[in-house]
Each structure stands twice: as structure tokens, then as C-alpha cells.
């Protein structure tokens, strides 16, 4: 399914707002959305219950909404979700489908993905005693935090071990991840590096989009007294100079200060929406 430029802009705006609200890196959230769904908020998996921009399966979505929904205006959904002693989530009659449908709302999906990433970062670093990488966070999204810590710990001990043997259920649902095209099982290291490569490619695409939007801003300089509305009523030249400086000094950390991230995202998206 092809995603229209208008819908892509709406998705990018939702991700920018989620990044600003939670402090989770805009580029990471963009890369994850591109890898998971190609920015298609209505994407559905053919092999699992995964749906939406970030392809949350039903149980993971109910868990993250239960934990963080009330913080972001979804208190009705959080209050409708219960949890049994065994950890299974239950939903009040009539509310289940409405809550699951939120996965296809870019704003709700982006906020919950950001909160999920932040929670997973804390859990991974606490378990492994090191800083979490973007690939680590993606493994947590893909396998759940328990599966991710199991995967990452096993990879540290024996990177050549078969990933499918350790995660047979996930391998059945995601054969192309756990097996090569010739049918041979991939190792833990091969699966990890496969995701690292895909995230890197997604990040490169995000960088291309960012540079394209800066080009749009630069073109606006040739349109007379164009003004980029940034909150300070700066000229396009001053705003572009500020943005270029921030981009050149950006780091690859998973969490960044939010005001500049939000401002950069707004400048890119406002031009795309013209």
C-alpha cells in the first residue's frame, strides 16, 4: 500500500509531538516507524496480531496503554484494562476493539511507542549494566522486554548460537528474520546485525528527508521576505542557520533534550504542509 505525502506528513507530525512530549529521540522513532510499517498507520501483519504504525501486537498494546495511557489523554482506555494474577490483560466489555483501534491512530501509536522505548531503555540498562543501543530497543519492541534481555544476554555469551532454537515461536511467525533465504537458521549475531542494518538504512532515509526539508527552507529564501514561523518570528535565513547548526551538532543518543528537537521537527513539517 502506497502512503500519500499528506498521510506521511501527518505521521511525521505525530512522531515529532511524541518526541517532544516524552524526550525520546525523534530520529529513532522515525526510523522505527519506517522499518515497522513504512509510515503506514493502517498496516497489519499477516502472521500475528500486530497492527498500526509501530506494529504493536494486542497484548503489548494493552500493557503499554494500561501503564501510560492516562498520561496522554487515554485514561478511559487505561481504566478499561485490567490484569489477572497470571499477567493476562482483560478489557471491559465493549471497549476492547476501540482500544486496539488506537494502534492505527498516529498520535496515540507514536506516544505509546515512545513510552515503550523509554521503559525498555531503563529495563535493558538495568539488566545488562550498559547503555542501550537503538538496536537493543528495537529487539525489545520485537521480542518484548523479557525476550530482548534473554536474546541480548545469550548473544553476549554465544553470538553464534541459533536464534530460532532459542525463540521457536517468534521464528515461526517471522521466518524471514530467523532464517536465510536458503532455509539455514540465522545466529543471534546475524539476527541482531540484520536489524542494526535495517535501522541504519531507515535512519539514512530519515536523514535524507531532513536534508530535503532544509532544502525546501533554503528555497524559501528566494521568495522575497519569506518568514519561517518558529515562535520568535525569525526570518527564514536566521531560522535556517539555526536549524543547520543544530543538525550539525546532533548526536546519536537515544534520548535528547526536547525543545530543540520539537522546534526542528516543526520547521521541517511546517514546510511540508504548505
Image (cartoon, grey):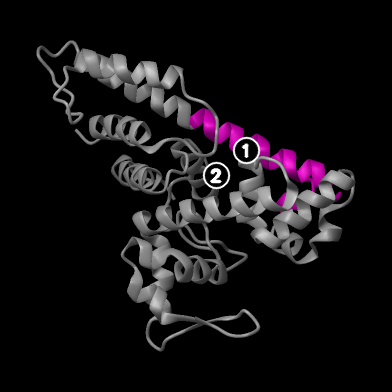
Instruction: Write down the residue under mark 2.
Output: 35
Nearer-the-camera pick, 186 or 262: 262
The circle on residue 170 is none
Which SS does the magenta portion mostly show?
Answer: helix
Instruction: Check the picture and name the quadrant holding the C terminus.
Output: top left
**Is 187 contained in the magenta span?**
yes
- Whether residue 92 is visible here, answered yes or no, is yes
Q: Tell me: 118 left or right of 129.
A: left
Q: Residues within 10 Å of mark 2 (few under 14, many from 20)?
A: many
Q: Tell me: 120 left or right of 128.
A: left
User: Which residue ends up furthest to the left in the rendered image?
Assistant: 225
As drawn, 194 above or below 229: below
As drawn, 174 above or below 239: below
As drawn, 111 above or below 221: below
Tell me the magenta residue range: 176-205
The circle on residue 198 is 1
Mark 1 / mark 2, whichever is N-terminal: 2
**Quarter residue 246 falls in:** top left
Q: Tell me: 188 left or right of 236.
A: right
**Quarter residue 259 falls in:** top left
**SS label for mark 2:** helix
**Residue, x 54% and y 49% (percent of image)?**
36
As drawn, 2 above or below 239: below
Q: Would you say the residues marked 1 and 2 are in contact, meaning their CB atoms lie under 8 Å apart?
A: yes
In the rendered image, residue 54, in percent from the top left (x then y), is placed at 50, 54
**Is 184 contained in the magenta span?**
yes
Q: Tell me: 32 left or right of 184.
A: left
Amino acid at each position: 500500500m502506497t502512503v500519500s505525502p499528506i498521510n506521511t506528513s501527518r505521521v511525521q507530525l505525530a512522531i515529532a509531538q511524541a518526541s517532544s512530549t516524552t524526550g525520546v529521540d525523534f530520529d529513532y522513532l522515525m526510523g522505527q516507524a519506517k522499518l515497522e510499517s513504512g509510515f503506514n498507520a493502517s498496516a497489519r501483519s499477516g502472521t500475528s496480531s500486530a497492527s498500526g504504525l509501530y506494529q504493536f501486537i494486542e497484548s503489548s498494546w494493552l500493557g503499554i496503554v494500561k501503564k501510560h495511557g492516562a498520561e496522554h489523554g487515554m485514561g478511559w482506555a487505561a481504566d478499561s484494562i485490567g490484569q489477572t494474577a497470571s499477567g493476562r490483560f482483560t478489557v471491559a466489555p465493549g471497549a476492547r476493539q476501540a482500544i486496539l483501534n488506537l494502534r492505527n491512530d498516529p498520535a496515540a501509536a507514536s506516544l505509546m511507542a515512545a513510552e515503550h522505548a523509554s521503559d525498555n531503555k531503563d529495563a535493558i540498562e538495568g539488566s545488562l549494566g550498559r547503555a542501550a543501543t537503538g538496536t537493543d530497543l528495537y529487539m525489545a519492541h520485537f521480542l518484548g522486554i523479557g525476550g530482548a534481555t534473554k536474546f541480548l544476554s545469550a548473544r553476549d555469551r554465544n553470538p553464534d548460537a541459533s536464534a530460532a532454537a532459542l525463540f521457536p515461536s517468534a521464528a515461526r511467525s517471522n521466518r524471514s528474520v530467523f532464517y536465510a533465504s536458503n532455509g539455514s537458521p540465522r545466529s543471534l549475531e546475524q539476527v541482531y546485525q540484520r536489524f542494526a542494518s535495517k535501522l541504519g538504512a531507515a535512519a539514512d532515509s530519515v536523514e535524507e528527508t531532513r536534508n530535503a526539508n532544509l532544502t525546501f527552507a533554503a528555497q524559501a529564501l528566494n521568495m522575497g521576505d519569506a518568514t519561517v514561523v518558529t515562535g520568535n518570528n525569525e526570518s527564514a535565513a536566521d531560522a535556517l542557520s539555526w536549524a543547520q547548526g543544530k543538525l550539525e551538532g546532533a548526536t546519536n543518543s537515544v534520548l535528547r533534550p526536547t525543545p530543540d528537537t520539537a522546534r526542528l521537527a516543526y520547521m521541517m513539517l511546517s514546510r511540508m504542509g504548505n
